[in-house]
Image (spheres, helix red, strand yellow):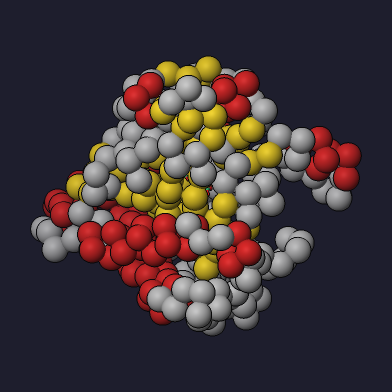
Amino acid sequence: MMSSNATTIATTSLPLINFANFTNSSTESRLRTAKQLVSACRTTGFVYIINHGVPKHELERAFAISSKFFDLPLEEKMKAPHPPGWSVHRGYSWPGFEKVSNATSSKEDEVAVRKLREVKDVKESYEVGSESNPDMPNIWPLEEVLPEWQPFMTEFYWTCFEAAKTVLKALALGIGLEEDALVSLHSGHYNQLRLLNYPPIPAQALEEGTSERMPAHTDWSTMTILWQDDCGGLQVEDPNHAGKFINVEPVEGALVMNIGDLMMRWSNDVLRSTSHRVTLPPLQDRIEGEGRITRQRKSIVYFLSTDPDRLIEVMGSCMKTLLQRAHSLQCFDLTVI
Ligand SMILES: O=C(O)CCC(=O)C(=O)O
Ligand SMILES: [Fe+2]
């Protein structure tokens, strides 16, 4: 559903989970934390996680190198362009190239695409994958343009995967599966690391909808983890009030985790893939000067995907929910073991 005309509420009420209580903790504490995570994923589908295992200095370096790349002149960035078409999602996407939408179609519908593209997404991104993904070879900036990009991003990709695996383990435990049940379907080679930059833009363009940062959408992934800078603007749709959006305010040191469409389906809709978007930052003091120029914003996103040859069936404990629904029983609290 496109929700561009939706109203906004300005409170943050997303759960925050401390993973120090999951890693290196007692069995009891691990289970409690896992259940907290699952409970959050059943309601908002969005949650903050602190003590997630990605070292602070690595994140700072990732943001610093990302800035270095996006600050380059366009012609330098264009030396590693995203290829045309859908099939390979790698390399640099310049402002206006990608249009995010939740529209679906079974065929190429040029008219609908042209209509969607009338309002541009003012953002740029760089997609990185595993060097061993046979379907999507990486595209790297020339070494003389930014020598540290390839070695750092190649390693950082796997650092993010380690953190994501811990989240997958907690999810599995929390829904009553073996701890490794979800991890075992993810070799890591089909994930996607996405560096994002939202250039400064007049506030009015976002207010009037003549430009967008990132329109409302759900993620296709198993799940997504992301880090944002201190600018703000990420919002998630309130699961209890369709069309209302809650600010996902920047929380220092926290990652934001959200359930993707695949996991929602896999869990028989028990875990929710929630619509989210990036729009105007919430505070007036984030908007500078006469044109009320909205600050630049950066984020780092990591999408998790199963290996393509794995069979995805409704998870065992969620199957009970299906049966309970069929018998008109309350499914809440009955299934999470
Ligand atoms: O930039 C952000 O904070 C959100 C990015 C996002 O939702 C996406 O890339 O799917
Ligand atoms: Fe997203």
**Residue sticking out furthest to the left:** 26
**Residue sticking out furthest to the front:** 290
Q: Is residue 43 above or below residue 259?
A: above
Q: Kindly tell me whether residue 222 is visible in this rendering.
A: no
Is residue 180 rendered to the left or right of residue 302?
Answer: left
Is residue 152 rendered to the left or right of residue 242?
Answer: left
Q: Kindly tell me whether residue 191 is visible in this rendering.
A: yes
Which residue is at 42% across, 50% downward?
Answer: 299
Q: Is residue 177 above or below residue 276?
A: below
Provide residue 188's location: percent of width, then percent of height.
46, 72
Which residue is at 69% across, 51% downward?
Answer: 97
Camera-nearest residue between 37 and 322? 37
Which residue is at 11% across, 58% downward?
Answer: 26
Provide residue 259's location: percent of width, then percent of height.
46, 47
Q: Is residue 150 above or below residue 266?
A: below
Rendered image quadrant of residue 74 = bottom right
Image quadrant containing the N terminus: top right
How many labels sit on residues?
0
